[in-house]
């Protein structure tokens, strides 16, 4: 039997997940589980790259498992696990850290943005070396595809450079070349209060959180920043607010941006448009929140994680042994 291709992705438990995480990543994941051998994890080691309160980290981690299940991931089909449960991530990281360069890492947009907000003397090495751990995540499972939003594609590109470099150095195909896969619509959802800025879990203003009360979600959408015109047209440069709302609508309705534009072509009131967008978001998020609550109360989380850790460790350790052997680390019984 031909081996199935693999898909792998993860989310960092650093804060409350947003509608951006949902559209750019979470809702995409289940689309792969029937055709790919799928690995979806919680990037909890990555969450330590900036200071975080321990109980907040722990609760966010549990939340993400519940969100994965609520979004339709089936633990029979998808291996769901914690990064910190599989020690091979940290071990491969300590090998691969020698294969990426200071110059490359310092050019990463995410590092530049996050480090700018910090005192230069207090930037953790982990924040700088973040893409090495992310490459280790991807390469341990020899993932063919990595479903992510727009902001993570640069890290996947760097992983590809690393694969080239590593395979070249040892003159064999140790790692498979991974490819980032972005959603067709909605790979970069913007903030509702400032549509020139990405919606992000670490920057709460104007962003929709998956745990927000339904009435708050409606309020946030109704007061989303738009422009003074009255045309519902996709034009991110001149109409970033309207374009963002159109993107959210199109994505959650599983239609193209053009189809969404067409639907709203006779509407001239932004208020009416926003109401339809809010109705759509609520139609999707309300039952999702319901499932999330049921899952949290059902006590399945620990079982999902312990089975996931076993399956993930088996695959990851196989790759780790191969890498150790390749680089000349001595393997013995
Ligand atoms: P994280 O936790 O920041 O984000 C999780 C996923 O959500 C996507 N995303 C968005 N998509 C659309 N619009 C937005 N406004 C938006 N904000 C976030 C992200 O692109 C991402 O796909 N480094 C990763 C976690 C990670 C990982 C990996 C991912 C660690 N190792 C290996 C894939 C493979 C991160 O911080 O994602």
Image: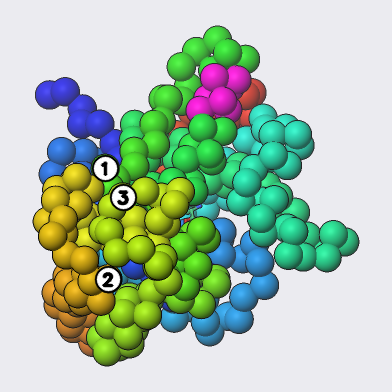
Does residue 123 lie above or below 283 as drawn?
A: above
Q: Which quadrant of the rendered structure holds the N terminus? A: top left
Q: Is residue 110 left or right of residue 242?
A: right
Tag count: 3
Task: Please give the name of the residue rendered at 48% of the width and 22% of the height, measured from the top-left corner.
Answer: 174
Q: Is residue 163 magenta?
A: yes
Cα gap from disc 1 to disc 3, whole angstroms: 15 Å
The percent position of residue 295, horizontal first and vertical second, equals 21, 79
Secondary element at image label 2: helix
Provide the major secondary structure of the magenta segment.
helix
Q: What residue is shown with label 1?
A: 184
The percent position of residue 277, horizontal first and vertical second, equals 22, 69
Circle 1 residues within 10 Å: few <14, some 14–19, many ≥20: few
- The residue closer to the viewer here, 289 or 197, is 197
Q: Which numbered disc, 2 or 3, marks the residue that appears first in the sequence?
A: 3
Q: Ligand 1 is found in which quarter of the picture?
A: bottom left
Q: Quadrant of residue 171?
A: top right
Q: Nearer the viewer, mark 2 or mark 3?
A: 2
Q: What residue is shown with label 2?
A: 270
Residue 114 visible (yes or no) = yes
Q: Is residue 199 left or right of residue 112?
A: left
Q: What residue is shown with label 3?
A: 234
Q: Is residue 235 magenta?
A: no
Q: Is residue 199 left or right of residue 242?
A: right
Extreme top residue here?
Answer: 171
**Label 1 beta carbon within 8 A of ligand 1:** no
Q: Which numbered disc, 1 or 2, marks the residue that appears first in the sequence?
A: 1
Q: Nearer the viewer, mark 1 or mark 3?
A: 3
Q: Are the residues at dot 1 and dot 2 in contact (C-beta closer than 8 Å)?
A: no
Q: Quadrant of residue 108?
A: top right
Task: Please give the name of the residue rendered at 16% of the width and 23% of the height, measured from the top-left corner.
Answer: 2
């Amino acid at each position: 039997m031909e081996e199935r291709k693999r898909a792998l992705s993860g989310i960092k438990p650093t804060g409350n997940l947003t509608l951006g995480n949902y559209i750019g990543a979470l809702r995409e994941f289940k689309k792969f589980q029937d055709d790919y051998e799928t690995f979806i994890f919680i990037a909890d080691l990555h969450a330590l790259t900036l200071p975080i309160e321990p109980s907040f980290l722990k609760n966010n981690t549990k939340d993400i498992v519940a969100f994965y299940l609520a979004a339709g991931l089936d633990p029979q089909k998808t291996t769901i696990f914690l990064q910190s449960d599989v020690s091979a991530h940290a071990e491969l990281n300590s090998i691969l850290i020698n294969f990426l360069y200071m110059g490359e890492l310092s050019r990463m947009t995410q590092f530049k943005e996050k480090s700018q907000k910090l005192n230069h003397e207090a930037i953790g090495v982990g924040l700088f070396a973040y893409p090495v751990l992310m490459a280790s995540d991807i390469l341990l499972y020899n993932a063919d595809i990595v479903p992510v939003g727009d902001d993570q594609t640069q890290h996947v590109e760097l992983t590809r450079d690393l694969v080239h470099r590593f395979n070249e150095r040892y003159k064999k195909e140790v790692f498979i070349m991974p490819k980032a896969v972005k959603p067709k619509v909605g790979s970069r959802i913007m903030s509702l209060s400032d549509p020139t800025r990405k919606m992000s879990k670490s920057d709460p203003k104007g962003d929709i959180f998956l745990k927000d009360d339904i009435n708050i979600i409606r309020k946030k959408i109704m007061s989303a920043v738009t422009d003074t015109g009255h045309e519902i047209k996709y034009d991110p440069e001149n109409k970033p607010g309207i374009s963002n709302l159109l993107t959210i609508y199109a994505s959650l309705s599983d239609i193209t941006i053009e189809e969404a534009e067409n639907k709203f072509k006779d509407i001239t009131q932004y208020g009416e448009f926003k109401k339809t967008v809010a109705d759509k978001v609520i139609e999707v998020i309300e039952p999702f929140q319901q499932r999330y609550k049921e899952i949290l109360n059902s006590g399945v989380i620990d079982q999902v994680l312990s089975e996931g850790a076993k399956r993930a460790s088996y695959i990851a350790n196989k790759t780790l042994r191969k890498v150790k052997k390749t680089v000349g680390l001595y393997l013995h019984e």
